[in-house]
Image (cartoon, grey):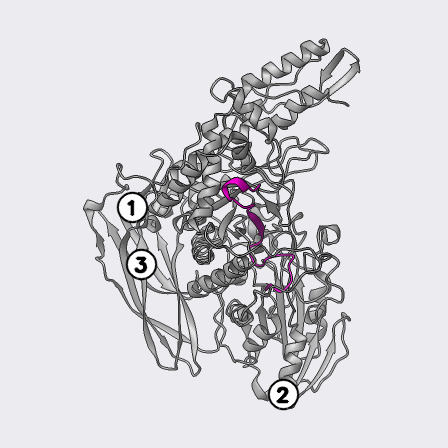
Amino acid sequence: MKCLENIGRYASFWGPNPRSAGGGSAVGKTPKWKLSTKKAALSVLSAIQTLANPHTSRNHQKPILIEQEHRDEFVPYKAPSDLPFYGRSPPVYPAPTANGTTPLWSHPHHLASLLVSNLTLQEKLNLTIGHAGPCVGNTAPIPRLSIPSLCIADGPASLRGQEYVSAFPAGLHLAATFDTDLMSLYGRALGREFHNRGVNIALGPVAGPIGRIIKGGRSWEGGGPDPYLAGKLFGKVTRAMQEQGVVAVGKHWVGNEQETRRRWDWDNRRHAVSAEIDDRTLHEVYVWPFMEGLKEGMGGVMCSYQRVNHSYGCQNSKLINGVLKQELGFEGFVVSDWDGQVSGVGSANAGLDLVMPGKGFWGSSLEEAVRNGSVSEERVDDMARRVLAGWYLLGQDRGYPERAIWGNLEKHGAVDVMEDHGGLIREVGAAGTVVVKNEKGTLPLGRKRRFVCVFGYDAQVKASPWTNRDRYGGGYEENYRWETFNGTLITGGGSGSTTPPYVVSPFEAIQHRVRKEGGILRWDFWSGNPTPYLNADACTVFINSYASESFDRKNLTDKFSDDLVLNVASWCSNTIVIVHSTSIRLVEAFITHPNVTAVVMAGLPGQESGNSLVDILWGDVNPSGRLPYTIAKSEQDYGAVLDPAGAEDEDFPEDDFSREGVLLDYRAFDRDGITPRFEFGFGLSYTSFSYSSLHITAKPRVDTNMGEWPEKNKEIVQGGHPDLWDVVAVVTCHITNTGDLHGAEVAQLYLGVPNSEKDGKTPVRQLRGFKKVGPLAPGETRQVIFELARRDLSVWDVVKQQWRMRRGEYKVQIGASSRDLRLETVIILE
């Protein structure tokens, strides 16, 4: 197979399957045809120029490869037709132009417009593509106007690949804190490290994947399967990072829920999986968290690899032009995931602004498309303005730190940006640790447990974790299909992994504590059946569950780990199991064993792992972590979302998100009447709490003049219609510490919208508020205030294409988890 040079150039620009109409399709199988080289070239060029205009063509597949039968005759490569899928993702053109409508963006866009007006076309085009440089991504400098190359770096939990930077807990671990104050402090510290190393654009936080696929490889990077919790984390971290002067790029927009077949396969020319998402599910689950980040001023959004309704994420005009830039008023830039662009004209007109890490299908080809009218220069102006507006928004044009990014083979001075972040990491690590079982007064250990055994491969650091200089534990070249990690697990794998300056292992921290208190230890990090010590006061068993970008998990358990726990529990009457896991890990094999007296879900706590855990085990910190997902009794309880979709031999693999719709995680368990092992929001404390005095302080009957719909004539700002954020009700209650120890409670508010039981598609209850209360002294009472916004009471109306507050009775329930509900009242919208 060989492409003629001139035809190949245009073919490369167009890509494997352009979507000039958002959800456009290709023509059917092309019969063999034979033309002279000159005629063929002119025919292909003419077709490409015609198809470049999204308003004049629906069928637009280029001949993918040209087979040269002899010098003057050739046939196009035959590809299966995706004509039946045309229109599933509606076309939305032209791409909206950012104009600073949102007050926050007004001045930055004014400055960016002035600057762009002085740029040549070539200079503007250079701002839209990646260039060589020290960072993961680099834009081109424009020296004559003092515009520097912008440095883009991973990731959501660390400035990956650098020295003297911190390794923060994963996003899912942060979510388990249910603490918005810690979320803000986390974002602030992370943002400072990026800023102080001269990074302009940080690739994080994460709201997609949200964790729909239970075995998804990247679920640990974001805030979990509840859109409200994930959204609060996303918004708080975004705001705090950008307050430090670095542009936050939210990812991945949208529907990127599995690793299996997530990308166009260039070698085998096979399509990525298509996330088939209905309009209501899209808005109420997958768009919802992004709205929080956008409202807080997010400067960038990364589009995803896979298709959505058969249109690739980075050229899906409905998602980028229609939802993100028009409906949600996004004023920043959209950047491709790395090598995620699969067309030139199609992606440009669909709203993509910046290609990474190289030129992709743009560069000189985009210049040619502008000159022949396939892409307007106004579209290129908008791309450049959006990139530069983020630079101005965060004041990066005024004395930004010098870039300090190097490889491990470059000699350089130390630029230490860690500050005191280790203390915060330790605090977040403990706050996100969830105790799910604690019997016979096992925890906290305290001074009464002097003889402690430490067993399991997860108790100590990996012996050789730096085979990949940028990724602690191992990179893509070696971690494929790992189920467990041979060492203590502090992060998952892939671009979201971290580069810790050190790792405090559980064994190191336990040994320090036991030695300090005059106790003794026995340990075994290798054996699956350790030597018994019948005089031991407590036996800790450390296991983990690994996941990474590039592959999905095979199982939610592993036999070696389960057997290790059971072998220890067979002789140790006080067995404490600690699970470091990237996401859901089932515990049925040992959870009911009478000698397993405590189980701790320790998540991905970052570099201070051991210290965070010891703070919980010995009671220096009273646990307040809560599960950000549901742990089932069986894999089958998760239903159709257990495994990723897309068989190897499918030409157009699909995953039907509409099967479950908005009913993910606990919402599905509630609908189906399935009793989980541990429900969403569950977590134990060493003390107890009572709930009382529930009141609707605004008015139990919402003002009827408010109406079901937001006001029609208000201008959209970044984040959506401004009315959506108006507070419509305030709910209060009191929490009292009824136990003997200081501790903090996580109060959770769940809302049931009218007619949810009847339509079968609306959750019986969904999280719409949470507050970490305390720490409270024994006997202390504190008031908790929940503010409910219009959006919290609304559902997405697919006919009106707007958020609607249904008239009727809203059930308000407050409690300690999604199934431990202590108080109940109603809000009535007449």
Instruction: State the SS at label 3.
Output: strand
Instruction: State the SS at label 1.
Output: helix
- Closer to us: mark 1 or mark 3? 1
Q: Residues within 10 Å of mark 3 (few under 14, many from 20)?
A: some
Q: Is residue 142 magenta?
A: yes
Say which residue label 3 marks.
787
Say which residue label 2 marks.
516
Give the extent of the magenta segment: 140-166
First in residue order: circle 1 vs circle 3:
1
Looking at the picture, how far across and down is residue 484, in whole percent? 70, 60
Disc 3 and disc 2: Cα gap in Å? Answer: 46 Å
Looking at the picture, how far across and down is residue 729, in whole percent? 27, 56
Residue, x 72% and y 61% (percent of image)? 559
Say which residue label 1 marks.
723
Query: In the shown orientation, is residue 421 left or right of residue 15?
Result: left
Looking at the picture, how far across and down is residue 4, in whole percent? 73, 19
Query: In the shown orientation, is residue 575 left or right of residue 189?
Result: right
